[in-house]
Amino acid sequence: MRDRLNKFMQGRYGVDQFARFTLGVALFVIVVGSFIRRSAAGSVLDMIGMILIIYTYFRILSRNVSARYAENQKYLGYTQKIRGQFNREKSMMEQRKTHHIYTCPGCGQKIRIPRGKGQKVEIECPKCHQKFIKRR
Ligand SMILES: [Zn+2]
């Protein structure tokens, strides 16, 4: 079974970030559509979802690898800013586990202080050199 699948996928493009995105949107649209199934908008959403799924599989199974690769690059280019923002938020969340992030009362600069045992420390803002005291 696995062999047959491997053989089938040989020379075909496969899953990329853009495929995950279109499939995600498709599932989202179908779920939303299922809540309003009885209205016209519900069946339109259903149809959009189906089309997106077909399109996703068309891309995954495509033999035109370079065209699909170019589409994915385009998608990554368009979404670079949003994904960058998202990754920044994510790393900020992770940093909050190991660091305190304080905002300088003088200039609003964000300052990262490694978490300690709750003792007070004097922090000097690297930008405007204002000093303030916080717990770490
Ligand atoms: Zn400052």
Image (cartoon, rainbow, N blue to C red):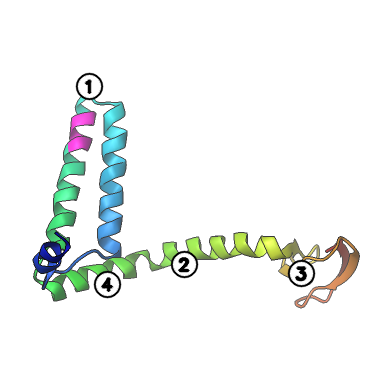
Q: Are marks 4 and 2 in contact (CB under 8 Å)?
A: no
Which of the marked residues, 1 or 2, is nearer the chain's N terminus?
1
Question: Which is more N-terminal, label 4 or label 1?
Answer: 1
The residue lying at 28 percent from left, 26 percent from top is: 36
Magenta: main secondary structure equals helix
Residues shaded magenta = 42-46
The amino acid type, in three-letter code, at marker 4 is Gln
Q: Are marks 1 and 4 in contact (CB under 8 Å)?
A: no
Residue at the disc numbered 1: 38
What amino acid type should be assigned to the residue bearing mark 3? Ile
Q: Amino acid at mark 1?
A: Arg
Amino acid type at image mark 2:
Gly
How far across and down, in percent of the image, does residue 31 sit? 30, 36
Marks 1 and 3, how far apart at CA: 55 Å
**The N terminus lies in which quarter of the figure?**
bottom left
Q: Badge 4 local density, few (<14 within 10 Å), some, or many (20+)?
A: some
Could you tell me which residue is drawn at 67 percent across and 61 percent down?
96
Residue 34 found in image quarter: top left
